[in-house]
Image (cartoon, grey):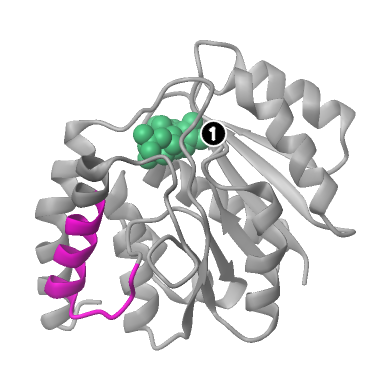
C-alpha cells in the first residue's frame, strides 16, 4: 500500500533535510513525504522546494500563514488523498517521532488496522527525557480525554499516526476545526465513532534537539474545552 507521510513544518530548517533523508531510507517504492509549510520565516519552505527538486519522493504544500497543526494536516490529508495515497501518515518534523518507526506503523495498517497510533502509554512505549511534571501533565490530559470520551485508547494526544485512505474519506474532515492536541484527540475519536479499528503500537517519544517547540498555553487550553464539546456533539448524534 502506497504511503504518504504528512510532515507539518514551522521553522524546522535544522531538522527538515535530515528528516526527509531518514524517511527516504525506510521508504518503499511509491512512498512519499509531503511537507506542509506555513510560510516559515527561517526558510524551511525554500529548503523543502530544493529537496523536492532533488528527490523524487518529496512534495511540498505551501500555506500562507501559520494556522496551527490541525489546518496544516487537513490540507495535507486532502492533497495526499488527491495524489492517490492508500495510507496517510502524520508525524512531527523534530525527531520526537523516530522515522525508523514508520515501517512498523505501516505494517500494522497493512495487517488490518484502520488507524494506527504510535503510543507512549502502552507496554513498550516510553518518554525517556521527560521529568515528572511534564509526564504528569501529559498523563493527566490523556486520562481526562479518556474519561470524558469514554475511550480505552491510551494515547489520545500523540501525533504519530497512520490512517487508511477510507478512514479519511469517511470522517467529516471539513467539520474539524481543532488546531493543537485537540486535533489529535478529535480525529482519533471521530475514527472510533465511525466504527473503525484503532490499534496502538509502542513508540519512544524523545525531546527535540534542534529548533524550538511551538506548543503554547492556548493549545493546551483548547484541548481542555474542546474535549467535552466533542463528546456533546457525539451524544447529540452529530458525529
Ligand atoms: N505547518 C505547520 N506546522 C506546525 C505548526 N505548529 C507546529 N508545527 C510543526 O508540527 C510539529 C510539532 O510541533 P512542535 O513545536 O514540536 O510541538 P509539539 O511536538 O506538540 O511540542 P513539543 O513536545 O514541545 O515539541 C513540528 O514539525 C512543527 O514544526 C503550524 O502552525 N503549522
Ligand atoms: Mg515536538
Q: Would residue 68 be seen by someone viewing this image from the given angle?
A: no
Dot 1 crowding, Cα within 10 Å, few <14, some 14–19, many 20+: many
Residue 91 painted magenta: no
Whether residue 214 is situated above or below residue 190 in the rendered picture: above
Residue 145 painted magenta: yes
Quadrant where the C terminus sits is bottom left
Whether residue 130 is situated above or below residue 14 in the rendered picture: below
- Secondary structure of the residue carrying numbered label 1: loop
Q: Would residue 12 be seen by someone viewing this image from the given angle?
A: yes
Chain part drawn in magenta: 138-154
For the point 30% across and 61% down, the residue is 185
Single out the residue that lies furthest toward the top. 42
**Which x, y percent locates residue 220?**
19, 42
**Which x, y percent locates residue 226?**
15, 56
Quadrant of the rendered image containing residue 174: bottom left
For the point 79% across and 21% down, the residue is 50
**Which x, y percent locates residue 18?**
72, 30
Quadrant where the N terminus sits is bottom right
Number of labelled discs? 1
**Which x, y percent locates residue 206?**
49, 42
In the picture of the structure, the residue carrying the numbered disc 1 is 94
For the point 25% across and 51% down, the residue is 138
Left or right for 208, reference 234: right
Quadrant of the rendered image containing residue 14: top right
In the foreground, 133 or 39:
133
**Mark 1 lies within 8 Å of ligand 2 (Cβ measured):** yes
Provide the major secondary structure of the magenta segment.
Answer: helix
Amino acid at each position: 500500500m502506497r504511503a504518504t507521510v504528512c510532515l507539518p513544518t514551522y521553522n524546522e530548517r535544522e531538522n527538515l533535510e535530515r528528516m526527509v533523508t531518514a524517511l527516504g531510507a525506510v521508504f518503499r517504492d511509491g512512498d512519499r513525504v509531503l511537507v506542509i509549510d506555513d510560510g516559515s520565516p527561517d526558510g524551511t519552505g525554500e529548503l523543502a522546494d530544493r529537496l523536492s527538486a532533488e528527490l523524487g519522493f518529496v512534495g511540498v504544500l505551501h500555506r500562507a500563514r501559520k494556522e496551527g497543526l490541525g489546518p496544516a494536516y487537513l490540507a495535507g490529508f486532502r492533497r495526499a488523498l488527491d495524489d492517490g495515497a492508500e495510507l496517510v501518515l502524520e508525524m512531527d518534523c523534530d525527531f520526537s517521532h523516530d522515522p525508523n518507526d514508520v515501517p512498523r506503523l505501516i505494517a500494522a495498517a497493512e495487517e488490518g488496522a484502520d488507524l494506527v497510533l504510535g503510543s507512549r502509554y502502552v507496554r513498550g512505549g516510553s518518554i525517556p527525557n521527560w521529568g515528572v511534571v511534564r509526564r504528569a501533565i501529559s498523563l493527566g490530559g490523556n486520562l481526562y480525554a479518556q474519561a470524558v470520551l469514554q475511550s480505552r485508547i491510551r494515547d489520545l494526544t500523540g501525533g504519530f499516526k497512520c490512517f487508511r485512505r477510507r478512514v479519511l474519506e469517511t470522517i467529516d474532515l471539513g467539520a474539524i476545526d481543532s488546531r493543537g492536541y485537540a486535533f489529535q484527540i478529535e480525529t482519533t475519536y471521530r475514527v472510533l465513532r465511525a466504527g473503525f479499528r484503532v490499534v496502538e503500537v509502542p513508540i519512544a517519544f524523545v525531546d527535540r534537539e534542534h529548533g524550538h517547540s511551538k506548543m503554547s498555553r492556548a493549545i493546551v487550553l483548547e484541548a481542555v474545552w474542546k474535549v467535552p464539546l466533542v463528546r456533546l456533539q457525539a451524544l447529540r448524534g452529530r458525529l
